[in-house]
């Protein structure tokens, strides 16, 4: 990777507020960093903490959740459930060595297209500053220690064949 | 739960959307890329996928190429998901074997780096292609639509919508917070550009509302709770006590004459330019013609001690000091919100002197002042008792101004012209209009402006800096001086006048946020209710079955308001006459086999759709009540709840695939 | 008479409890011995590694491996036994999901060694000596297994056919699994041989669980007198039951202790900790940041609580900012 580090951010946006805000950012032709990949859910309450961990585990450098402002949930209270989970998940993620900048929860209403732009740009800049996470390559690096044995095991196999012979 | 082993044959279509997508995203490159993905049978680009030939292309490919999954990369699913689902079903495939990729609003419109945008399009296309494999055939469910309609706010928008619906034979509940219907329009004197009298065109409609057999008109009432969903709302309405038995009062006003008080309280309808008693009727044509007693002012209600001469004077015994507020519950299928606007508070711009100099007026005050039934009977006499010889009208007060409201209030130029005409007509004063730009787009509006130019009204282009009574020369003494940079002449002018009129802009109501929450709709950043789509769904909201009309959606004049009210009524009618609405099948269900009955999900549902089956000891979701938020699914500790269209595997796949790019 | 199926048992990074659980079969062990030939079981029988090496590939019908994989020797043995066995079965939490040993995935190899050989209060090691992988002394070479950076579940090292969960598995589950193996009536490869429903289903306290938990505080078992009848979550105690596979017959909750999750998640769950977190947090009463945070103070160690037996198999596997030190070189 000689080129500049471009963070990969997976975003989970609720359809009613933040996804619509991102649509509005588009309609308003606001320009922001192309690093996010948005996954639409009906409500931020649908966002399973597994999704965030799954995203990190599959190479996300950051995960962004976008939901309706407190009190404004299209489904009355889904965003509160999201908020409560995010509180503890943030601790888990940090306890597991992931910098807090990489997991972000933002309330962005359907009218706040400009906030989508600000938040995404800000997050991209922050993650650029702390560098890549890229867990799949870390996993690979960790598991490289198991390759040491390959020689031994092959050797064992040879022995086995020898003993069978 | 086992997927049937069928060969996946996916059709992928990328839309250029003219140049909207094609100029940023390299569509042919995406087509080529997608061809290499698993399960792809067809990968094409097309100029306009949403066009008839674009849709036909999908349908034809399904038939001829035996496709069983469809992915379209184009605009936002919020815009065209339905279109492509229809195209999918046109080809004979269940419409839910379709997934949409938003590469316009979320990609080509927001990025400038073509490579990065193309890469993003590929990532999202790959994710959709992978996700759609996990889709299932689903059926849309239908919810019946209750034929009654609730209209909140009875200004011209609410009135027009109510009459339209009632004339079509639908039963309407029209709820108004004030003691009378009519709204702002009832306060206006004449209307631009035709100068027909507002009361003359409005009051007949008001009495039609009152008399219409299909309209239940509730004034002095407010909606307090809203439950349910499209087709099936349960609404609670609070009737505030007016201390008058409405059915008995005939509006003879004998009680008003009899009241022991002198006229000493500010008359809201006349913008405080006149006084009224604690028992009053807002204005002569108020509808209903029923008096109201202000409990904050009435001696009897405040202290319990009064000789109750009003009650004595009422030969119909309509006065009831013991009236209490009542709550009424109704069922409706659709709702129109037409709660109107609030005038900008001129106090926020002290440099214009409203509230400081008595002869500075707001436009609404002038509407009352020039009105024949207003506080002066139409005589333009100022607060100091004098008649003005020179009047300055200042446009854009609380509009087009970074420090107050950024937006153009759309009506102020036109009503300022109207007021210039009326003030001149009523007072023969010399009139100055101070404007930034003159905005007169509308039928016969520019002609009206022309007429005013010919009538000799002075127009000064420039935003007024301040109004002051600090005279710098003899001519300015005892006058209000308007200091303004005349941007056409190129110098700062000081223009002494006797009277100043502030063309205050339009804002959202103070309680718009409360109303928004009550009805579960959205507000834009400026506070007005948000429409579902600015062009294609201007009276729809994000909540099905709830529509908006008039100035609560944004500043607009009477013709536009009436047009919107008609549109909202038509939207209600469309739903009512269809009899039922198709609901997105994104509801959740419990996998009974794997549910442990831990009950973690039950209280999470705001719609009480989840209950505990005491016999099976498992949770059960009532599909009719489920609105498809998926909160229970996210929370289920054993992943035993499945949300249609948002299944775990579908989302996990999406996550993995957007990140799969190496 | 056809030969009896050959069975092997082996232990890796484990406490020995799984071995005990085999003996817990009690008289049923006789049935086992009657029906199978135990060809390798280091804890109980005197076979050596070279005996296994000498076996034909695939000659062992079923091999039950317990314990997580932490050292090169365990890796090697796992690979060897895989090669020799038709069915390789991860037996117990450690082999299944990493178990308690995988909690050490929160620390680096160096942190662990430093603590164990230097900082631990009971250690007397003034030279700060550390074990060396290879030592030549007086011309004699001694080697010991390398201590890896990462603790792994068995299937992160070798292909695994079935899993028997639990810390340790119950004799009942072991017996059922053995019967299934003997009869050849085995489910789809990769199946966990326990019910695929969360523990609550079989918990005697289930009926006492209220519909609305609305947590305002969490307590740890030693902080209160636990009501022996009432749902533990309803008492503010973190119980992993809702997110944990059943099949243990609620041993812990019957013993007045909360479930700590040893059976791992149900089959549809990818991360047990994330799911119990989702369910518990969703049911917190507070809606504001401060209130939520205050309630969550009662969970001082979420990773240790929610991933007690499964950190190795969690989506993140290990503290991600830990690197990988060389493990075989001498220090």
Image: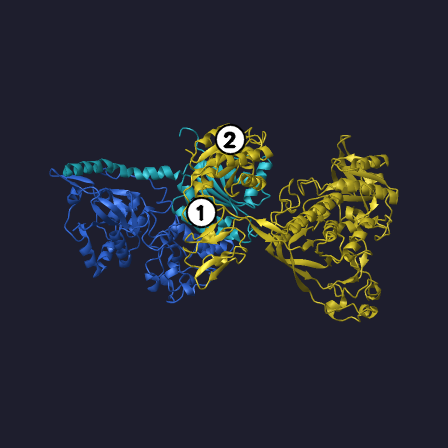
Q: Chain B is drawn in which colour?
A: yellow
Discs 1/2, front: 2
| Residue closest to the eye, C175 or A46 | C175
Q: Can residue A126 be seen in this view?
A: no
Q: Which of marks 1 and 2 is nearer the N terminus?
A: 2
- Which residue, as the protein is rendered here, is positioned at the far front? B64
The chain ID associated with circle 2 is B
Q: Is mark 1 on a helix, strand or loop?
A: helix
- Place residue A157 in its image quadrant: top left
Seen in the picture, residue B168 relative to B109 is either above or below; the reply is below
Task: Check residue C235 in the rendering and tell me which mark sits there, or answer none.
Answer: none
Seen in the picture, residue A44 relative to B43 is either above or below; the reply is below
Task: Check residue B648 in the rendering and tell me which mark sits there, or answer none.
Answer: 1
What percent of the width, then of the height, locates residue B90?
56, 39
Q: Label 1 crowding class (10 Å Cα cut-off): few <14, some 14-19, many 20+? A: many
- Which residue, as the protein is rendered here, is positioned at the far right? B428
What percent of the width, then of the height, locates residue C129?
21, 44
Q: How is the image coloured?
A: by chain
Alpha-carbon span between mark 1 and mark 2: 29 Å
Q: What element carries label 2?
A: strand
| Residue closest to the eye, C231 or B97 | B97
What percent of the width, then of the height, locates residue C156?
31, 43
The chain ID associated with circle 1 is B
Q: Chain A is drawn in which colour?
A: cyan
Q: Quick one: which chain is blue?
A: C
What percent of the width, then of the height, locates residue A96?
38, 46
- Please give the residue where the numbered disc 2 appears in the rendered image: B44
């Amino acid at each position: 990777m000689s080129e500049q580090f471009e963070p990969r951010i997976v975003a989970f946006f609720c359809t009613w507020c933040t996804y619509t805000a991102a649509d509005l950012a588009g309609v308003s032709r606001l320009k922001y960093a192309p690093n996010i990949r948005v996954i639409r859910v009906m409500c931020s309450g649908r966002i399973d903490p597994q999704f965030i961990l799954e995203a990190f585990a599959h190479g996300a450098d950051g995960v962004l959740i976008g939901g309706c402002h407190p009190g404004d949930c299209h489904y009355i209270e889904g965003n509160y459930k999201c908020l409560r989970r995010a509180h503890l998940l943030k601790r888990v993620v940090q306890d597991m060595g992931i910098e807090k900048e990489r997991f972000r929860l933002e309330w962005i209403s359907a009218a706040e297209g400009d906030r989508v732009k600000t938040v995404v740009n800000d997050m991209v800049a922050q993650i650029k500053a702390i560098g890549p996470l890229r867990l799949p390559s870390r996993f690979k690096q960790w598991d490289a220690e198991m390759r040491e044995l390959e020689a031994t095991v092959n050797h064992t196999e040879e022995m086995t064949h020898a003993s069978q012979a | 739960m086992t997927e049937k082993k069928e060969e996946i044959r996916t059709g992928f279509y990328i839309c250029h959307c003219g140049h909207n997508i094609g100029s940023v995203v390299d569509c042919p490159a995406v087509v080529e890329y997608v061809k290499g993905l698993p399960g792809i049978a067809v990968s094409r680009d097309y100029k306009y996928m949403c066009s008839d030939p674009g849709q036909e292309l999908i349908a034809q490919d399904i038939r001829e190429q035996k496709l069983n999954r469809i992915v379209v990369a184009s605009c936002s699913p919020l815009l065209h998901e339905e279109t492509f689902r229809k195209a999918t079903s046109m080809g004979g495939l269940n419409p839910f074997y379709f997934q949409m990729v938003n590469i316009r609003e979320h990609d080509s419109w927001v990025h400038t780096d073509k490579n990065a945008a193309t890469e993003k399009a590929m990532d999202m296309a790959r994710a959709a292609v992978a996700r759609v494999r996990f889709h299932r055939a689903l059926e849309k469910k239908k919810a019946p639509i209750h034929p009654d309609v609730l209209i909140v706010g009875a200004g011209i928008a609410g009135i027009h919508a109510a009459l339209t619906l009632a004339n079509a034979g639908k039963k309407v509940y029209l709820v108004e917070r004030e003691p009378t219907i009519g709204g702002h329009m009832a306060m206006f004197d004449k209307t631009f550009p035709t100068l027909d009298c507002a009361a003359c065109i409005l009051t007949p409609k008001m009495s039609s509302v009152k008399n219409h057999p299909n309209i239940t008109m509730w004034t002095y009432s407010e909606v307090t709770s809203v439950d349910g969903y499209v087709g099936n709302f349960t609404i609670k309405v609070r009737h505030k006590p007016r201390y008058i038995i409405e059915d008995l009062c005939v509006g003879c006003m004998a009680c008003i004459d009899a009241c022991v008080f002198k006229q000493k309280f500010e008359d809201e309808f006349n913008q405080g330019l006149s006084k009224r008693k604690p028992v009053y009727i807002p204005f002569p044509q108020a509808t209903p013609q029923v008096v109201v007693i202000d409990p904050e002012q009435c001696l009897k209600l405040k202290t319990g001690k009064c000789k109750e001469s009003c009650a004595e004077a009422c030969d119909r015994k309509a006065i009831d000091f013991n009236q209490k507020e009542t709550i009424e519950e109704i069922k409706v299928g659709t709702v129109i919100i037409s709660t109107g606007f609030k005038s900008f508070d001129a106090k926020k711009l002290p440099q214009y002197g409203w509230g400081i100099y008595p002869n500075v007026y707001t436009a609404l005050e002038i509407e009352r002042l020039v009105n024949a039934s207003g506080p002066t009977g139409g005589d333009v006499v100022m607060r100091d008792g004098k008649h003005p010889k020179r009047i300055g009208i200042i446009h854009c007060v609380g509009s087009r101004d970074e420090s107050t409201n950024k937006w153009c209030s759309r009506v102020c130029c036109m009503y300022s012209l109207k007021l210039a005409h009326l003030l001149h007509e009523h007072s023969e004063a010399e009139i100055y209009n101070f404007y930034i730009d003159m905005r007169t787009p509308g039928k016969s509006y520019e002609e009206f402006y022309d007429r005013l130019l010919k009538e000799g009204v002075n127009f000064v282009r420039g935003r007024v800096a301040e109004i002051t009574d600090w005279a710098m020369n003899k001519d300015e003494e005892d006058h209000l001086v308007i200091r303004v940079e005349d941007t056409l002449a190129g110098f700062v002018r000081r223009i002494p006048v006797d009277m100043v009129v502030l063309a205050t802009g339009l804002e959202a109501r103070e309680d718009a946020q409360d109303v928004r929450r009550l009805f579960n709709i959205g507000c834009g950043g400026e506070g007005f209710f948000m429409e579902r789509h600015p062009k294609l769904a201007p009276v729809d909201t994000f909540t099905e079955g709830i529509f908006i009309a008039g100035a609560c959606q944004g500043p607009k004049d009477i013709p536009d308001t009436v047009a919107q009210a008609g549109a909202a009524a038509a939207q209600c009618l469309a739903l009512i006459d269809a009899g039922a609405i198709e609901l997105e099948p994104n509801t959740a269900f419990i996998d009974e086999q794997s549910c442990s009955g831990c009950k973690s999900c039950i209280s999470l549902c705001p719609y009480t759709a989840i209950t505990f089956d005491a016999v099976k000891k498992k949770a059960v979701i009532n599909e009719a009540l489920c609105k498809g938020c998926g909160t229970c699914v996210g929370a289920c500790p054993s992943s035993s709840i499945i949300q249609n269209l948002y299944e775990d595997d579908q989302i996990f796949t999406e996550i993995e695939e957007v990140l799969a790019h190496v | 008479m056809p030969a009896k199926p050959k069975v092997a048992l082996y232990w890796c990074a484990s406490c020995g409890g799984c071995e005990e659980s085999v003996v817990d079969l009690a008289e049923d062990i006789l049935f086992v011995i009657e029906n199978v030939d135990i060809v390798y079981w280091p804890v109980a029988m005197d076979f050596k590694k070279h005996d296994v090496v000498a076996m034909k590939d695939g000659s062992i019908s079923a091999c039950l491996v317990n314990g997580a994989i932490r050292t090169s020797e365990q890796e090697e043995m796992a690979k060897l036994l895989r090669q020799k066995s038709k069915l390789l079965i991860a037996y117990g939490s450690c082999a299944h999901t990493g178990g308690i040993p995988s909690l050490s995935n929160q620390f680096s190899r160096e942190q662990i060694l430093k603590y164990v050989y230097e900082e631990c209060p009971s250690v007397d090691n003034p030279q700060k000596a550390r074990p060396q992988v290879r030592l030549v002394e007086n011309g004699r070479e001694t080697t010991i297994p390398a201590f890896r950076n990462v603790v792994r579940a068995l299937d992160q090292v070798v292909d695994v056919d079935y899993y028997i969960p639990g810390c340790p598995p119950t004799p009942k589950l072991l017996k059922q699994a053995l019967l299934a193996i003997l009869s050849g009536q085995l489910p789809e490869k990769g199946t966990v041989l326990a019910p695929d429903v969360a523990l609550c289903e079989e918990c005697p306290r289930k009926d006492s669980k209220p519909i609305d938990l609305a947590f305002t505080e969490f307590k740890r078992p030693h902080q209160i007198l636990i009501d022996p009848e009432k749902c533990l979550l309803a008492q503010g105690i973190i119980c992993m039951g809702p997110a944990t596979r059943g099949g243990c017959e609620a041993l812990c909750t019957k013993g007045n202790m909360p479930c700590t999750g040893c059976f791992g998640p149900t089959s549809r769950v990818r991360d047990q900790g994330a799911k119990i977190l989702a369910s518990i947090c969703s049911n917190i009463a507070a809606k504001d940041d401060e209130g939520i945070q205050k309630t969550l103070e009662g969970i001082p160690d979420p990773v240790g609580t929610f991933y007690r037996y499964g950190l190795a198999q969690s989506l993140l596997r290990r503290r991600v900012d830990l690197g990988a030190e060389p493990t075989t070189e001498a220090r």
